[in-house]
Image (cartoon, grey):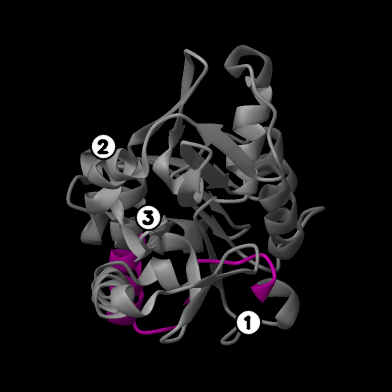
Amino acid sequence: MNIAICDDSHGDIEFLKEQIKYVSRDSDRIVFYEFSDGRELLEDYKSYDMIFLDIQMEGKMDGRQTAEQIRKMDSDALLSFYTAYDFPASDIVKVRPFSYLVKDRNPEKIREELETLMEEARRRQKDIDVPILFHGNSCVIPSREILYIDIFDKGCGIYLTEKGVDRVCRIQSTLGQDIQGNMVKSSKRLGEYYELLKEEGFAYAKKSYIVNLYHVIFNSKEYITIRGDTILNVARSKQKEFQEALGKFWGEYPGGKQ
């Protein structure tokens, strides 16, 4: 697991590393990358499993500015602020941190929050590749980059996150199809996708579509909102089943509510 820590205090970095090792099941497999300034982190940016950012740093770029730039490059990065401030400002919330660790907080409380972060990082590592088939061509996309899948034109429409759209656009000519907004077509049937993804946090909201529960940000009895402010109806016949699946998912993976 690759973990980046960006903080201008060497002592705070060492303390955080010790707490991460304490809660980790496999600390010998963790590789830490240390940065004292946001610009350093961005210049050496890679796909880290977790990124910790101090908010106020002495360098040229603080944690908030760094987070904004990371979100432009990697909309799904697992960000956590590690700071002396005891509450997040509104401009901090906009970059969607998964958690907010306060440095002076009781170490036991910090370890509890780190355990949740580690569990989410492990879950993301388990993302499976989902095949997209079209006119005999195929590609795969990580399940995390799918918002929902519905029945479309004798196959399916797969609705993607911004990161998923960018990924498919890079191979668009190979796949041989146009992307309609954030949707790409596939000749596979919805039932096939459900069988592949039902253990990965996907559930039927209607007979005509399955939803990636990770991306649900608001839930009511009759409809849900997913990232990107897309509102989807939950069929009456599916409400009990869907609510149970979502409740279980949010219980096991608190990050799904972020």
Q: Is residue 220 above or below residue 119?
A: below
Please say whether residue 102 is visible from this viewpoint: no
Dot 3: few (<14), some (14–19), or many (≥20) neighbours within 10 Å?
some
Dot 2: few (<14), some (14–19), or many (≥20) neighbours within 10 Å?
few
The quarter holding residue 230 reads: bottom right
Q: Amino acid at mark 3?
A: Lys
Q: Nearer the viewer, residue 253 or 184?
A: 184
Circle 2 sits on which residue? Answer: 29
Q: Residue furthest front?
A: 154
**x 26%, y 37%: residue:** 29
| Residues at marks 1 and 3, CA–CA distance in whole angstroms | 22 Å
The residue mark sitting in front, 3 or 2, is 2
Please report whichever mark, 3 or 2, sits nearer to the chain's N-terminal start: 3
The quadrant of the picture occupied by the N terminus is: top left
Q: Position of residue 238 (x, y in %)?
A: 31, 73
**x 30%, y 72%: residue:** 242
**x 47%, y 40%: residue:** 156
Q: Is residue 128 above or below residue 147?
A: above
Q: Are marks 1 and 3 in contact (CB under 8 Å)?
A: no
Dot 1: few (<14), some (14–19), or many (≥20) neighbours within 10 Å?
few
Q: Nearer the viewer, residue 80 or 181?
A: 181
Please report whichever mark, 1 or 3, sits nearer to the chain's N-terminal start: 3
Q: Which mark is residue 5?
A: none
In the rendered image, residue 25 lying in the magenta stretch gets the answer no
Q: Secondary structure at mark 2?
A: helix
| Residues at marks 1 and 2, CA–CA distance in whole angstroms | 31 Å
Circle 3 sits on which residue? Answer: 17
Q: Amino acid at mark 1?
A: Pro
Circle 1 sits on which residue? Answer: 88
Q: Which residues are magenta?
A: 93-117
Q: Position of residue 77 (x, y in %)?
A: 54, 50
